[in-house]
Image (tube, rainbow, N blue to C red):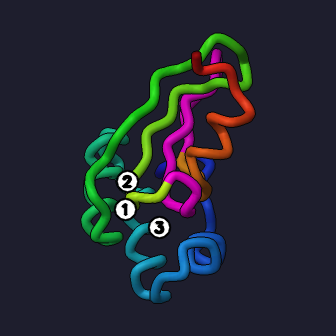
Amino acid sequence: MNTERLPSVKTIFNNLRIRKEQAERIRSIMERAAPWLDRMQAINTVLAAHGVESIPAGKTMKSPAIAFCNTGETYENTILRIFPFGQSSYFAVGNWGSIVERGNYA
């Protein structure tokens, strides 16, 4: 059984403004016992996004590495995979632009 922290169907549905069936499918993909990149690529297909992209970690604890389904908009909510320093990575719903603004990625 997958024990990683996952956003709920309700969170996915409300924050991505997608059909409930899509949110349920995304949550199901997150629960799979598969490498995170394979799951992100499957989620990208459900979202009909523009591919999975990543941002390397910055210089501070507020600057984790981030992988995301590219919606084409920096501040549009999407599915993220966050890689915090010294902790396990996890799925989240949000936008990568806000994380980069708060961090030190220069």
Q: Mark 3–mark 2 contact, CB under 8 Å?
A: no
Query: Distance between the Cα atoms at labels 2 and 1?
Result: 17 Å
Residue 8 in view, yes or no:
yes
**Residue 54 covered by magenta stretch:** no
Q: Mark 2–mark 1 contact, CB under 8 Å?
A: no
Depth order, front residue of 33/61: 61
Residue 3 in view, yes or no:
no
From the viewer's perspective, is 7 left or right of 68? right
In the rendered structure, find residue 29 and report the number of the disc placed on it.
1
Report the residue at 58% width, 53% height from top. Answer: 95
> Where 42 falls versus 17 (above or below)?
above
Residue 31 in percent (x, y) is at 44, 58
* Category of crowding for the residue at label 1, using alpha-carbon neighbours closer than 10 angstroms: few (below 14), some (14–19), many (at least 20): some
Question: Which picture quadrant has residue 11?
Answer: bottom right
Q: Amino acid at mark 3?
A: Arg
Q: Amino acid at mark 2?
A: Asn
Report the residue at 26% width, 46% height from top. Answer: 38
Q: Amino acid at mark 1?
A: Ile
Residue 28 in percent (x, y) is at 41, 68
Q: Mark 1–mark 3 contact, CB under 8 Å?
A: yes
From the viewer's perspective, is 94 left or right of 61? left
**Residue 89 covered by magenta stretch:** yes
Residue 1 in percent (x, y) is at 47, 51
Say which label, 2 or 1, has the lower sequence index.
Answer: 1
Badge 3 marks a residue whose secondary structure is helix
Q: Return the residue found at the far top.
A: 59
Q: Tell me the magenta residue range.
A: 74-90
The residue tagged 3 is: 27
Badge 1 marks a residue whose secondary structure is helix
The residue tagged 2 is: 70
